[in-house]
Structure formats: C-alpha cells, structure tokens
Image (tube, helix red, strand yellow):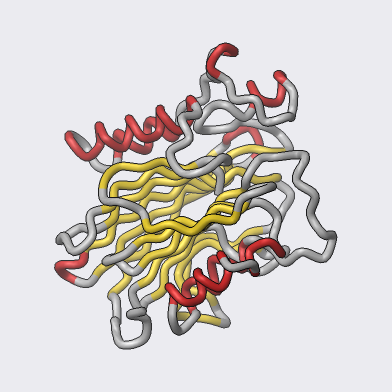
Amino acid sequence: MCLIAFDFHPRMPIPLRLVANRDEFHQRPAAPLGAWQDAPDIVGGRDLEAGGSWLAVHRGGRVAAVTNVRDPSLVVDPGAPSRGHLVRDALECPDLSAWLAELASGEGWRYAGFNLLAGDGDRLWHLHRSRDRLLLSQVSAGLHGLSNATLDTPWPKLISARQGLAAALRRRWPEDALAAFSATQPADDGHLPETGIGLELERRLSPPFIVGEQYGTRAMTWLEWRASVDLIELEERRFGPGGHELGASREIISLRHALLRS
C-alpha cells in the first residue's frame, strides 16, 4: 500500500472512512479481496508471494494497513520478514496495544521501512519505521493521509488524496475520493519530494494513481466502518499493466467483538 487517506472519529457511529491505493510490481501474485482460506476471520487482499497483506480487517473488530517507507539508503537484512505480515499480526494478536509497544521497543527494526496503521474503532495507532526512527503514536481524530514518508507528510499525492476524501465526506462518498485517487497527472517538479531516487522516478511515482507496464497501482480500496450497526463495508478495484481495470470485489462484514478488544 502506498497511499492512504482516512477520516477517524472514535466512538462515533462511523469511526473510520478510508481510501487507499496499493502500488506494486504487476508480476507479483496477489489474491483479490475476500476471506482468507487459512484464516477466515480475516478479510482483505493478499500477497501470494510472502503471504501477508497491505490492507485487511478482522471480524473481531480490527483493521490494519501498511505502506512502505521510501528511502534507498535504508539498509535491510536480506532475511528480514515481509512487512505484509505486520497486517496479519496486528489483526490476530490478542492485545494490540501491547504488541505495538513491543514492536516500538525494538522488534520493528527487523523490518524494512514501513508505516503501520492499526485500530479497533475506538483507538487507531500509527507505527513508523524509517532509517533512524521507530515511533509509535495514537492517531488523533480527524482527516489524515499517509504515503511513503510518515503520517501527514505533505507530498503532492497525499495532499490531493486528502482533499479528495474531504470533498467526498461533504458531497459524494466514496465517489469523489475515488476520483482523487484515480488521478494520473504527475506533480510539478517544484513540489516533488527528494527521497534519493532521482527526478525522473520521483515524477513517475508522484501521481495518486501510477500507470506503468511493470509497476503501478494494482488495487484501489475504500472502507467504511459503521460501528452503530457493527459492520465494515469495503470494496477493492483491481488494475493491471497500463492501468487497465481487472475487476472489483465488495464485502460487507458483520463484526464480532468477543475476540479483539485490547
């Protein structure tokens, strides 16, 4: 997952609305949104190469998503675990706050750079691991965005995505947010971040929706958590090389809270 915008309001009838784009190499195999065969309480897309996910929910009342941190100078152990496993672990661990605290105390250094969002509807945490930072914080109520830096870093694509979500909340949800996440126009050079990958690649990666033959936006997902009726609805739209649409899946999940209230 490389771009997320979300509106978080704990203990409200709709505590979370979220839209996200997953950018990845097209050749990397993935399963579409659905219940996992080996863990049917988890519903989400799945990376079939490493077995993790970029965005998923648990029927016990938990949601988790991960993005990479873009930093070519960050040295990673070749045997480092996949960051996608953080999503599954966040959903299945018996005590989410304790597990996150353990990661923040040092376990998170084992992974390549990442941002992890995880929450239970009442609380939402952000864990950031970069070259020299491993920081856990609770997310404040309101509108936020996350890409490949840290929470609310004002990259052009994040600003555009967050504005699109804000418009959708005022007018047409989720259509206006999805339109913003579908934009393919690169940002002006003067507004590009400098992450050490060179100007040409910064341009290619700057739109919310990345079009490419080898690498690009693979999935666009929106999620709405309706706490008042204990439901989470989410839809995933999938894309192939050149941005061609491959299909869509929608799930409406009835939540059970007996398992996962940490």
Q: Please state which of residues 240 and 13 is positioned toward the viewer in this rendering.
A: 13
Q: Please state which of residues 252 and 260 is positioned toward the viewer in this rendering.
A: 260
Residue 136 image position (x, y, % from top left): 49, 59
The residue at 70%/19% (across/down) is 199
Residue 87 falls in image quadrant: bottom right
The answer to whether residue 37 is left or right of residue 125 is: right
The answer to whether residue 125 is left or right of residue 21 is: left
Residue 105 image position (x, y, % from top left): 58, 68
Where 201 sits versus 50, above or below? Answer: above
Q: Please state which of residues 247 and 65 is positioned toward the viewer in this rendering.
A: 65
Residue 250 falls in image quadrant: bottom left
Q: Please state which of residues 206 and 195 is positioned toward the viewer in this rendering.
A: 195
Where 139 sits versus 208, above or below? Answer: below
Query: How many numbered discs sit on the rendered protein?
Result: 0
Residue 256 image position (x, y, % from top left): 29, 81
The residue at 51%/75% (across/down) is 99
The residue at 26%/50% (across/down) is 141
Residue 98 image position (x, y, % from top left): 47, 77
The residue at 82%/59% (across/down) is 77
Q: In which quadrant of the rendered image does the C terminus lie?
A: bottom left
